[in-house]
Amino acid sequence: MKNPTARLRLPSPAFPVLVLSAALLASGCAIKPEPLTAEENLARVRTDMSVVLAPQEPVTKAISMHEAMARAIKYNLDERVKIMETAVASQQLDLSHYDMLPRVVASAGYVGRNNDSGSESLNLATGRRTGESTTAMDRHRRTGDLGFTWNVLDFGVSYLRARQNANLVLIADERRRRVVQGILQDVRTAYWRAVAAERLLERIAPLERRVEGARRDARTLETLRVQAPLQALTYTRTLVETLRQLQSLRRELVASKSQLGALMGLPPGESFDVELPGKEGMKAPPKLDVPVEALETYALLNRPELLEESYNQRISADETWRTLLKLLPGIDLNAGLRYDSNSFLVNQRWADYGARVSWNLINLVSAPATKTYADAQEDLVGFRRQALSMAVLSQVRVAMLQFRELNQEFGLTAEQADLDSRIRSQYANVGDAGQIGELGVIQAEVTTLLSDLRRDLVYADLHNAYARVMVSAGVDPLPETVPATDLPTLTDAVAKGLGSWQERANSALRVRDLAVGTAPAGQAAKPEAETPKAAGVPVAEAPRTVVETGVTSAPLAVLAAAPAAMKPAATPAHGATARFQPVAQVELGAYASHRLAQRDWDKLAKAMGPAAEGKGALFVTTRRSGDGQPIVQLRVGGFADHASAERFCQGMKGQQQECTVRTVSAGEDRPSATVAAL
């Protein structure tokens, strides 16, 4: 009788494998959260501080504004972060180039088993086994392969991905530009506040000592009852209030230099001096001799956010192509060198090659939806850039208005500071003659100090507004190439860049010149093909516009009749050829098809209820110049004036619907448009 435990005995080669697997599983289950130790935390702090407090070019003289900006460009940590992000994006681009190469895989291995790999044969004619066991494989073998694989479809996808990564490098650089512009705006503001602090803090200390002495004298007089108690207390209270104002003034100014030092990347607590301009320099506000129209064009051409969106549109276009490529069949080309030590093989070394075509047929069903989705994503990027362009134009206008207002305010505060200074001189003369007490002289000096502070702070705000104009226009303080990165070279480059940017901005075209297309000399503009006119619906054509996103707008048909004319008529109305006055319309959005626009209008009209009565929807179809795909703009007309359109738009915004009021000039050709009236 056989031993019953013999069948449980495992072959010796398998036992170590099972033990190793069990050990790995046990170690995997034993993982627990491990917080940083004190040594690891200390090492982290030392590593970070060695970078943060790295030696810089020493401060050997008072720092000017241009040098402060140069130090911020070179040593500011936020700037370093953006530079590293640009470097990482460049490295990612370099790596994506390797994705386009074919795969070449080398492998080697060992295969063994504890018994022979044998088999019997079956005679299909008789249905009997041959009874002979044969093998064609050694128990222990060595194998090796060198395989080459290339998928043509993957090559195309990798190529487009590399193009996207190239645009990501440009996006990272634009983000770095935006950070630099913001840092330099903060540096300009902090510098002039630090100048105000340097000018006024040295005047506060002796004035505080005078107030403290007067307060002690007042308490002595109160104790000796030289004056009436109420008069003595009122005098002391006035002195305390004056001292409180001085301390509040000190608190507002004392952190200015620390903020400037942090922006320049100086170690915390390192002392430095700022270069103080002369008195005449503080009276001269920065000059801005650029028309707002030129700044608008300059901003549209140079703002980092707009350029970033343009690169995003490139990425979106490549993503559309990637999506379409994935719908195509894949073609695999393969070849390889093989080795197998099996002694039963006739050829232990051989080469093989082949090709394979594979296609997911389900892609044929999803192709239209995929194409529509990709096009919608691409259009979204374009519309988002257009909205951002409008925001940029508004920011330029607002920045210019703020600069002009602060310029006027600075003139008034400077005049007030001059008057208070002259009044203080009169108080000082009268006080020396003994005609008034110490309190009057002290109050006059405090008033003068506060006036000087207000003037200097408004001057700092004026420089901040000047820098905001530069940021809103996308002005770079440095040229595209700088010969060296040492501090004197950067300082000179900043000074030259800030001194010449207005000349560059003045050379830009105006926005209205860019928006109006003109035919070349000697060629007449070709008239648009006439389109059938909708019976009974008077419409008019808005001026043609050229949009930068690659979407060329067709003549925009707009409603130009009174609310009663919005309703479809059975017969053509007389006087349809008369000239129309400007009309107010409400634009609700753009859609990929007329059906989607009609569906949204039905929902909105139902939600608005009585407010939508007498209003009609106009579906204006335009086509993209790239592929001719239609874009349907949903507009609403039938408003008596601009105010009623504004009220209607407010109601739409209450329904969480984007809404814009447009005033359309009419009176030229009147192509047809599809109208839905309630």
Image: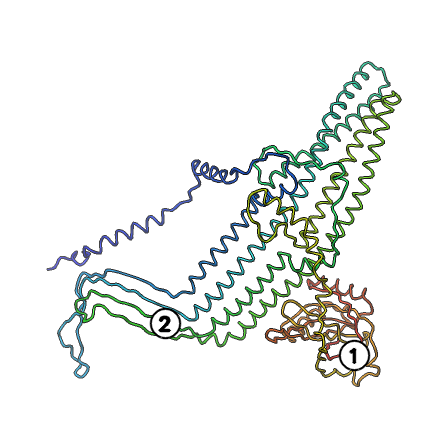
Q: Tell me the SS state at disc 2.
A: strand
Give the x, y percent position of residue 561: 81, 75
Residue 5 point in image, percent of width and height: 17, 56
Residue type highlighted by circle 1: Pro
Residue drawn at x 72%, y 58% is: 294
Q: Quadrant of the N terminus?
A: bottom left
Seen in the picture, residue 117 relative to 61 is either above or below; the reply is below
Residue 462 sits in which quadrant?
top right
Q: Is residue 459 visible?
A: yes
- Disc ID at residue 333: 2
Q: Nearer the viewer, mark 2 or mark 1?
A: 2
- Residue at 56% in and 72% down: 372
In the rendered image, residue 228, in percent from the top left (x then y), is placed at 86, 19
Question: In the image, is residue 561 above or below residue 198?
Answer: below
Q: Which residue is mark 1?
A: 538
Q: Is residue 248 visible?
A: no
Q: Residue furthest top?
A: 224
Residue type, label 2: Leu
Work out which residue is located at the far left of the displayed protein and give it. 1
Q: Outermost residue, right direction? A: 435
Tell me the colour scheme of the image: rainbow
Would you say the residues marked 2 and 1 are in contact, meaning their CB atoms lie under 8 Å apart? no
Above or below, 175 relative to 365: above
Crowdedness near tag 2: few (<14), some (14–19) or many (≥20) residues, C-alpha within 10 Å: some
- Camera-side residue: 455 or 673? 455
In this orientation, which residue lies closer to the viewer: 281 or 221? 281
Frontmost residue, 235 versus 508: 508
Q: In the figure, is residue 347 to the left or right of 218? A: left
In the displayed structure, does residue 593 sit left or right of residue 14?
Answer: right
